[in-house]
Image (tube, grey):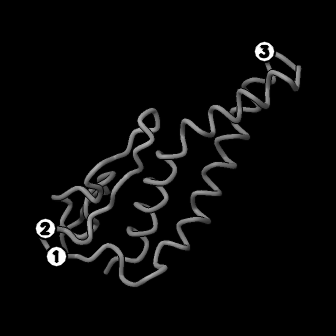
Amino acid sequence: MKERKFKYGKCPICYKEKIFLFNGNIFLLKPPIIKHNCSACSYVYEKESGYFIGALYISYGLTVLELIILYVIIQFFTENVWVIFPFMFSFLVLLSFFNFRTSRIIWISIFNK
């Protein structure tokens, strides 16, 4: 059996086509748009309605991990809560589209055949 390497954002079956049509832009408020299926191998990304509900848990885990790491880093520079939490909130907003894409890519990759 041929061993395949994981490629971020590519189809988990053929690794040729991108999963997302548009990666999104937080500054233009344009969310990421996912394709219905892969044009190379016809793998359907969203199997049924509500398929990506589980990706919410992955996104939550990513967000918590990022905020804990950010809190520990910022704690070295300042202990003022009025500086830490607004910075963490802005970091959270800036990474929201990245977490959205990453959690769906992980979810699709978990359940492929």
Three-letter code, disc 2: Ser
Is residue 79 shown left or right of residue 47?
right
Mark 2 or 3, which is nearer the eye? 2
> CB atoms at circles 1 and 2 under 8 Å apart?
yes
Seen at 28% across and 59% down, the residue is 19
Residue 46 placement: quadrant: bottom left
Mark 2 surroundings: few (<14), some (14-19) or many (≥20) residues within 10 A? some
**Residue 35 picture location, percent across and down:** 26, 64
Q: Give the labeled residue for mark 3.
A: 77
Q: Could you tell me which residue is drawn at 59 percent across and 39 percent down?
A: 93
Cβ atoms under marks 1 and 3 closer than 8 Å = no
Q: Earlier in the sequence, mark 1 or mark 3?
A: 1
Q: CA distance from mark 2 to mark 3?
A: 49 Å
Task: Indicate which disc residue 42 carries.
Answer: 1
Q: Residue furthest top?
A: 77
Q: Amino acid at mark 1?
A: Ser
Q: Residues within 10 Å of mark 1 (few under 14, many from 20)?
A: few
Residue at the limit of the structure toward the left, as seen here: 40
- Circle number at residue 25: none
Dot 2 falls on a residue whose secondary structure is loop
Give the residue number, with chain letter if any, for mark 2: 39
Which quarter shows the N terminus? bottom left
Three-letter residue code for mark 3: Phe
Q: Circle 1 sits in a helix, a strand or a loop, which is it? A: loop
Residue 105 x, y percent position in the rendering: 40, 60
Would you identify the image quadrant in which residue 48 lies? bottom left
Q: Earlier in the sequence, mark 2 or mark 3?
A: 2
